[in-house]
Amino acid sequence: MIKDLVFTDMGEIIIKLLLGQLVIIAVVWTGMAFFFSEMAEPSKVIFYLVTSWMLLLIVIIIKTWLKNRKS
């Protein structure tokens, strides 16, 4: 019983950390998207990397949320 409680709390902490990181990345991505037309090629590569990281975070958050929901 205590083991289940610890894993539940840990799952909630992980979700909160992932959501916090997603919010920060989304703010950075929005700022970069605003200036996309003025970006040089290296800046566009960074933009694509940030976009990929944000999409990966979304997938990990959904996967973690579904896993915690089933438990």
Image (cartoon, rainbow, N blue to C red):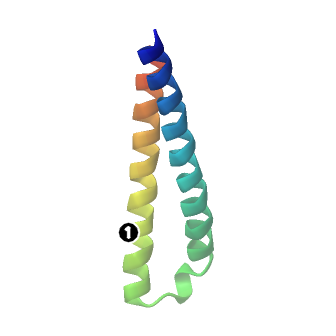
Q: Note whether 49 is above or below 4 in the view shown.
A: below
Residue at left 55%, top 67%? 29
Mark 1 residue crowding within 10 angstroms, few (<14) / some (14–19) / many (20+)? few
- x, y percentage for residue 17? 53, 47
Residue type (three-letter) at the residue carrying disc 1: Leu
Give the quarter of the figure containing the C terminus: top left
Is residue 71 visible in the rendered image? The answer is: no
Residue at left 50%, top 47%? 18
Q: Note whether 39 is above or below 71 in the view shown.
A: below
Left-right relation of 27 to 56: right
Q: Note whether 17 is above or below 10 in the view shown.
A: below
Left-right relation of 42 to 16: left
- x, y percentage for residue 53? 40, 59
- x, y percentage for residue 57? 44, 49
- x, y percentage for residue 28? 58, 69
Residue at left 48%, top 31%? 11
Is residue 59 visible in the rendered image? The answer is: yes
Q: Which residue is mark 1?
A: 49
Q: Note whether 38 is above or below 57 in the view shown.
A: below
